[in-house]
Amino acid sequence: MIKIKNVTRKFGDFTAVDNISLEVAKGEVFAFLGPNGAGKTTTIKMLTTLLRPTQGEIFLDGHNVKENPAATRRSFGIVFQDPSLDNELTAYENMQFHAILYDLSKQLYTERIPKLLELVELTDRKDSYVKFFSGGMKRRLEIARGLLHHPKVLFLDEPTIGLDPQTRNHIWTYVRNLNKVEGVTIFFTTHHMEEVDRIAERIAIIDHGKIIAQGAPEEIRKSTGANNLEDAFISLTGHEIREEEGNVGQNIMKINRKLMG
Amino acid sequence: MRTIYILWLRQLKRFIRKRASLVGALGQPVLFLFALGFGLSPIYARAGEGDYIQFLAPGIIAMTILFTAIFNGVDLIWEKQFGFLKETFVAPVSRFSILIGKTLGGATIAAIQGVIVFLITLTAGFRPESLAMLPLAFLYLILIAFLFAALGTTIAARLDDMQGFPLIINFVIQPLFFLSGAIFPIVGLPKFLEFITKINPLSYGIDGMRYALSGANVFSPFVSLGVLIGVSIAILFVGAYQFSRVEL
Ligand SMILES: Nc1ncnc2c1ncn2[C@@H]1O[C@H](COP(=O)(O)OP(=O)(O)O)[C@@H](O)[C@H]1O
Ligand SMILES: [Mg+2]
């Protein structure tokens, strides 16, 4: 379903993703793990046509992502790590906008939207403007929106960041169900290892843009001799803490790159 | 079609909900209309050119459209920064439809503002030459709105943040406005200025509108129509290419 062949992505001189290769089978639940700044989001952006690889090839549902981005876009859905809602619209309007962009029939979306809003407990706020939402509410709405159309591949980039355990539980149950019932391939990133334990069939660990381990969670744990996945992850990626770079940092980097040529 | 409609509708909703900016955007044209209109009227009349308000009003309406259309196009930069553009860019919708939806949204808003300013010019003493010509004036108004909404969107596709925006306003949009015959006639100018006014598409928009509203023109109204449509198509081509290049 997903095939990444020797893909590299540079930002100026900096190599964010360094010659990675990966395959994800149809119907698989795949976890893509790594510390902050490892290159997870950059990889997902390349898979979803938002960034072009500097080198290498990507196939998604048989489409060459670089050469045929339009066809690729019909095959996937995504929940972004960063906000992507329209704050001037209501929760319902954001959902409806998405439904129409993805060409869902009115009958289908008027049935699905209330269910999803219920799932993320936003039913009573459906007509409030998103700009008045708290961070957690926005996050929940992003997820509900991402689950609205049922694609062949669903990308979830740190979907549950900042959410309470109950909500996380609801969401993963729903996602797993989507995978089991409709055969949707799931490609997700997270920092919560118990989520990985719970639903991932296979994982890859990326650090400094390179893939350093790949396999079933159990294999990875055994190969490092750790007691659990969390320890295995730490022993593979080291103990130092990585700072997350926000949008502000990235924009400054972009400007610098322009000034430096 | 449904996707273009929803993109258009979204922009209109945003416009209607931000009433403060709606009113704010009327400040500049009203100021120009009254300050220039009443300030320069006596000189204009003494030069034997007639009633300055009759000349100025189409220019001020076009100015409103120009700025509103560009600002609404450039809105795209905010969508990039606040992340919403990602949502539309990963959807199974061609980039060209997104460009068209965005442009039609901006153009509609600019056209609405243009009509509001037209009504304001009536209170300043402007009188259209003939009511029968109003539909033609409206056609020019829409074409100007479309052209500059497309231009704003295309420019925004190239910019990553608002930092480049003042540069665009000062070195592209203001000159387009001042060197277009909006506030003074473009006949008998020094050669260099005349050249600029002739390659400025806004000159043709204003001239066409002035023909329809005040019965005065420099270019043939058909030439003006042709230029507006031709330049719009050219901008859409460039915009479509820019859109296909955007990385988020
Ligand atoms: N647009 C960009 N310009 C410059 N550097 C970037 C850009 N996007 C990401 N990076 C850098 O690439 C690296 C990988 O980032 P990212 O893929 O977001 O990591 P992760 O999602 O694993 O936390 C980071 O060092 C980040 O700063
Ligand atoms: Mg990330």
Image (cartoon, coloured by chain):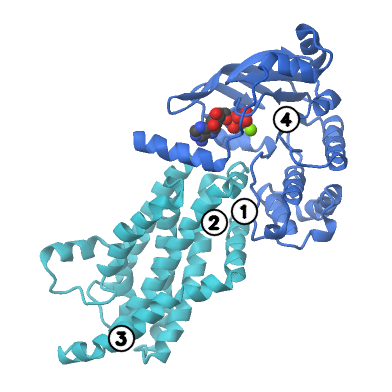
Chain colours: A blue, B cyan
> Mark 1 — on which chain does it sit?
B
Cβ at disc 3 under 8 Å from ligand 1: no
Tell me the residue that label 1 is attached to. Answer: B3
Left or right side of B190 for A64? right
Report the Cα–Cα distance between label 2 and label 1: 8 Å
User: Is the Cβ of the residue at disc 2 closer than 8 Å to that at disc 1?
Assistant: yes
Disc 2 crowd rating (10 Å Cα; few below 14, some 14-19, many 20+) is many
Cβ at disc 1 under 8 Å from ligand 1: no
Q: Secondary structure at mark 1?
A: helix
Ligand 2, image quadrant it occupies:
top right
Tell me the residue that label 2 is attached to. Answer: B101
Tell me the residue that label 4 is attached to. Answer: A188
- Could you tell which of marks 1 and 3 lies nearer the N-terminus? 1
Which residue type does callout 4 highlight?
Answer: Phe
Which residue type does callout 3 highlight?
Answer: Gly
> Mark 3 — on which chain does it sit?
B
- Could you tell which of marks 2 and 3 lies nearer the N-terminus? 3
Q: Residue at x 58, y 73 (%)?
A: B19
Q: Are marks 2 and 1 on the same chain?
A: yes
Tell me the residue that label 3 is attached to. Answer: B37
User: Is the Cβ of the residue at disc 2 closer than 8 Å to that at disc 4?
Assistant: no
Q: Are marks 2 and 3 on the same chain?
A: yes
- Could you tell which of marks 2 and 1 lies nearer the N-terminus? 1
Which residue type does callout 1 highlight?
Answer: Thr
Which residue type does callout 2 highlight?
Answer: Gly
